[in-house]
Image (cartoon, rainbow, N blue to C red):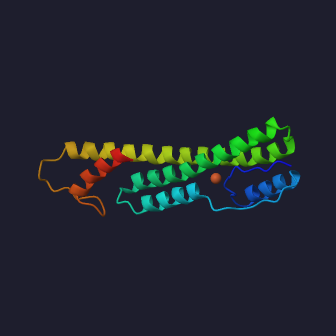
Amino acid sequence: MRRYRLFIHRGSGNQSRHLEQAFQLLEEKAKSKPCEAMKGLIAEGQETMQEDFSEPLLDSAIICAAQKVEHYEIAGYGTVCAWARSLGLEDVADLLDQTLNEEKAADEKLTEVAGGIISEAGTAESSDEEEEEGETVGAGSAPRKGSSNKAGSDNKSKRRAV
Ligand SMILES: [Fe+2]
């Protein structure tokens, strides 16, 4: 039987079980191999967590890092699922499709959470701007927790870079 050499993230729980079942149906032995791309995405996510962003921006950036992982998984599972269907391996394709749908659902959930954070941050920022418009220059408004006015402007420049 032909060897399947596309490397996809093994996941955990159901996802791992689905892969093992798929290999059993193929009468192939599953072999694991560290995934350099996934390691890179995780390292990038860990770097993001160290950034000096304002809280909503940091949360949004972390969600972005998590979505990069989901998109990588969706690409891998989507491809092997299509391969299985094109070979008439419907049982294998159905197993992989379950995992693909879990990855898509996770991505959609992250998009939903990110949307809430972004709109909440936008609401908070516009109410900050309304307060600032009513202040006299030099009135000494308190800086946000953990930042100075200068850091606040730095955050704006970082926001553009994300
Ligand atoms: Fe995932």
Q: Position of residue 152 (x, y in %)?
A: 26, 54
Could you tell whether 110 is left or right of 149 in the image?
Answer: right
The residue closer to the viewer here, 50 or 120, is 50
Q: In this figure, what is the number of numbered marks?
A: 0
Q: Quadrant of residue 104?
A: top right
**In-image side of 162 versus 130 (left or right):** right
Residue at screen point 76% across, 44% down = 97
The residue nearer to you, when weighing 146 against 127, is 146
Which residue, as the protein is rendered here, is positioned at the far top?
A: 86
Quadrant of the rendered image containing residue 49: bottom left
Q: Which residue is depicted at the point 43% across and 46% down?
A: 120
In this view of the protein, which residue sits in the foreground, 38 or 50? 38
Along the viewing direction, whichever of 108 and 95 lies nearer the viewer: 95
Residue at 13 percent across and 53 percent down: it is 139
- In the displayed structure, 111 sits above or below 7; it is above
Residue 15 location, x and y as percent?
74, 55
Q: Is residue 115 above or below residue 38?
A: above
Lateral position of residue 127 relative to residue 7, left or right:
left
Question: Residue 4 placed where, x, y %?
Answer: 76, 49
Q: Position of residue 154 (x, y in %)?
A: 26, 53
Residue 87 sits in which quadrant? top right
Q: Residue at x 19, y 43 (%)?
A: 134
